[in-house]
Image (cartoon, helix red, strand yellow):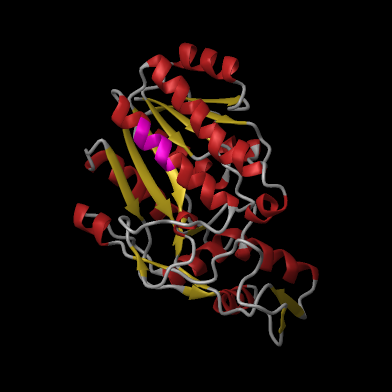
Amino acid sequence: MNILVAGGAGFIGSNLAGALLGAGHRVVCVDDLSLGREENLARHRSNDRFKFIQLDLLDQSRLDALFAAERPECVFHLAANSNIQAGAGDRTIDLHRTFLTTFSLLQCMKNHGVGQIVFASSSAIYGERAGALREDAGPLFPISCYGAAKLASEAYLSAFAHGGAMRAWIIRFPNVVGAPATHGVIFDFINKLRANSRELEILGDGMQEKPYLFVCDLIAAMLFAWEHARETVNCFNVAGEGTTTVRRIAEIVVEEMGLADVVFKFTGGKRGWPGDVPKFEYDTRKIAALGWRASRNSEASVRAAVRAILGKGAEEL
């Protein structure tokens, strides 16, 4: 198929492009490079089924011309503001970069008769809820602009899909880890310890606890859902077994870097920043019933990601 990957120069998008190329598809990656990095795509450049185009998805006329020229049959939409802290400070960021990018893509898809979209959503849509999160939970009250924009995007995907000849797959990501990382707790810890191997500042109390999923498993889940789920709108939580605390992540990073006697200094409070959901767990029985399970649990995903970022037996698609 001809596939458009929006946000293709990012950490997840660049790995997804490799998987799609490996499956024989033609891939056009689009990214404005505000957060993505063109070097993430270097390994795909020699493939004649790969193309990269630098483009702002909010430039509707250029996006429309791209759809007309490249004729995608499916869109994998990963473009978004991935800096939740920045979105808390400037509440227009997620409106434009997380929600309006979705609307712009949907408009072009409708205008050009593109019938499939796979959307990267987030646990942030659930807000703070007790117990294992189910896809049919509700009502939903996100506590970050990022979560609100992702939830609004889901609603528009559903409306567009039910209003015309379009099918949508919504994949609600947990905390995704791996290489090439550009942000996130593991990336931050490694950089802090490279600067000062004697102590590590940890935001919050270190007891924040979430499911972590290695990027290869995430992409396998996305492709599995896309290939096997056939409803008009298909929505899945994706994660491996278990959760991991921020303190345990710090311990794993210290172990893998071969450091000793590192002092952990906590900033205090139950959350790392405004809009951070300190604890959640996923109910993943829906995608399990479809036939998919992660190859790693949460802690194994964290360790694999640390090793990948450090270049120790890095696992790539």
- The quarter holding residue 43 reads top right
Query: Could you tell whether 76 is left or right of 254 in the image?
Result: left
Where does the image place residue 313, in percent across and percent down from the top left?
A: 52, 61
Looking at the image, residue 47 lies above or below residue 292: above
At a point 60% along the width and 40% down the height, the residue shown is 95
Q: Farthest residue to the front: give it.
A: 139
Res 154 seen here: yes
Q: Nearer the viewer, residue 250 or 168?
A: 168
Res 180 seen here: no
Looking at the image, residue 111 lies above or below residue 158: above
At a point 45% along the width and 47% down the height, the residue shown is 121
Where does the image place residue 261, in percent across and percent down from the top left?
A: 71, 87
Where does the image place residue 181, in percent across and percent down from the top left?
A: 60, 53
Q: Main secondary structure of the magenta part?
A: helix
- The quarter holding residue 287 reads bottom left
Looking at the image, residue 14 lies above or below residue 274: above
Which region of the structure is painted magenta? 154-159
- Placement of the N terminus among the 4 image quadrants: top left
Q: Is residue 158 magenta?
A: yes
Looking at the image, residue 310 lies above or below residue 108: below
At a point 32% along the width and 25% down the height, the residue shown is 115
Q: Farthest residue to the bottom: give it.
A: 261
Q: Is residue 66 magenta?
A: no
- The quarter holding residue 200 reads bottom right
Where does the image place residue 70, in percent across and percent down from the top left?
A: 46, 16
At a point 33% along the width and 60% down the height, the residue shown is 294
